Image (cartoon, grey):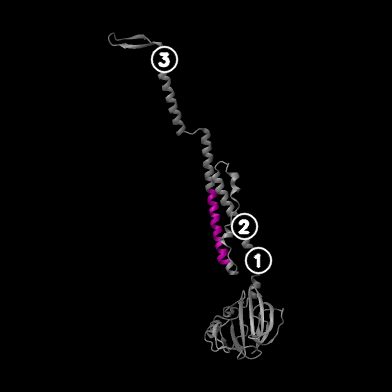
């Protein structure tokens, strides 16, 4: 700091040298030092908030790259999720419906992928939220894909059995269309010819001549060849896949219990046994041990016109015979 300073004298129009006291020099030094410190601090603050250090720039660049990669991965995961949802919908509503299989419950498809602590080891990582959320989505997707793959394995097995199932479903008339005279009673409620009460009729009745051949309506195994008070002589065939067929009021048998039969094979002969008012066949189809309307299962040997005629005949039945 200078010991002297110069001042301009207006009277003499000359600069005059004036010696500073130590107090003046100390004051000047202090002011200049403080000013420099304040300016330096301001510059540091401005630089800190407006300019990144090389390390910060590197970290920010790496973070932006990570976000970009995460965004791409997230979109791919979402795309895979949407594709999987489409596959699941077709699986439940088309493939499983074709094979009469129950849809997979949502509780199984969306089951948890593990305990809440499986992601603890990721919490110490940089950008842990991004890593954990992505890991969760990928794990959930992996579980759902595994379940869907197992479902397709089941459908493949069902497909392989479909040929057998189609051959086993009772899908033809139990009596040749040329051999029965008429449908004497349809499926549903009607007045019983003997009891004279309104009783459910769980099958269809076909009138015809005694000893007219009766055919197995699908592949299966004969599980009953017996005589019952109401049905008289009857045969019950288990076709598998939940289906059974019943043939009642027969005059005679052409099969034995435990025998395997093919669709179209003669199993018995039309008769008038049991509680019956005339020669006829009482025929039932059961699914999971519950009677269902047999008229829905004649699709294998009737043309559209013949089927329409049969439906009309069933709708205009007169007095039933059992």
Residue bounds of the magenta highlight:
72-95
Vertical placement of residue 232 versus 79, above or below: below
Mark 3 packing: few (<14 Cα in 10 Å), some, or many (20+)?
Answer: few
Is any part of residue 48 visible from this angle?
yes
- Which quadrant of the rendered structure holds the N terminus? top left
Of badges 2 and 3, nearer the viewer stands 3
Marks 2 and 1, how far apart at CA: 17 Å
Q: Residue at x 53, y 57 (%)?
A: 82
Residue 43 at x, y = what percent? Answer: 44, 28
Q: Secondary structure at mark 3?
A: helix
Is any part of residue 171 visible from this angle?
no
Q: Secondary structure at mark 1?
A: helix
- The circle drawn on residue 157 is 1
Which is the main secondary structure of the residues drawn in magenta?
helix
Marks 3 and 1, how far apart at CA: 100 Å
The answer to which of 151 and 30 lies nearer the viewer is: 30
Q: Mark 2 sits on what residue?
A: 146
Residue 108 at x, y = what percent? Answer: 59, 59
């Amino acid at each position: 700091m200078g010991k002297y300073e110069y001042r301009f004298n207006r009277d003499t129009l000359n600069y005059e040298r004036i010696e500073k006291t130590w107090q003046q020099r100390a004051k000047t030094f202090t002011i200049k030092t403080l000013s420099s410190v304040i300016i330096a601090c301001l510059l540091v603050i401005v630089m800190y908030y407006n300019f990144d250090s090389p390390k910060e720039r590197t970290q920010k660049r790496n973070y932006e790259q990570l976000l970009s990669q995460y965004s791409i991965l997230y979109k791919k995961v979402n795309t895979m999720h949407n594709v999987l949802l489409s596959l699941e919908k077709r699986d439940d509503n088309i493939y499983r419906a074709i094979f009469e299989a129950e849809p997979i419950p949502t509780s199984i498809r969306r089951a948890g992928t593990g305990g809440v602590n499986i992601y603890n080891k990721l919490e110490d990582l940089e950008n842990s939220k991004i890593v954990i959320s992505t890991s969760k989505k990928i794990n959930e997707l992996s579980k759902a894909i595994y379940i869907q793959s197992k479902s397709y394995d089941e459908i493949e097995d069902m497909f392989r059995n479909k040929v057998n199932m189609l051959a086993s479903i009772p899908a033809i008339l139990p009596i040749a269309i040329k051999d029965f005279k008429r449908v004497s009673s349809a499926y549903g409620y009607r007045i019983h010819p003997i009891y004279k009460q309104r009783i459910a009729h769980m099958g269809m009745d076909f009138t015809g001549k005694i000893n007219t051949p009766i055919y197995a309506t699908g592949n299966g195994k004969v599980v009953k060849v017996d005589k019952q008070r109401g049905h008289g002589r009857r045969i019950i065939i288990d076709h598998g896949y939940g289906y059974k067929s019943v043939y009642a009021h027969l005059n005679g048998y052409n099969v034995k219990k435990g025998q395997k039969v093919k669709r179209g094979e003669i199993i018995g002969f039309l008769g008038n046994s049991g509680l019956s008012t005339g020669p006829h066949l009482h025929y039932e189809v059961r699914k999971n041990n519950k009677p269902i309307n047999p008229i829905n299962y004649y699709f294998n040997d009737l043309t559209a016109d013949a089927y329409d005629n049969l439906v009309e005949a069933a709708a205009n039945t007169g007095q039933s015979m059992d």
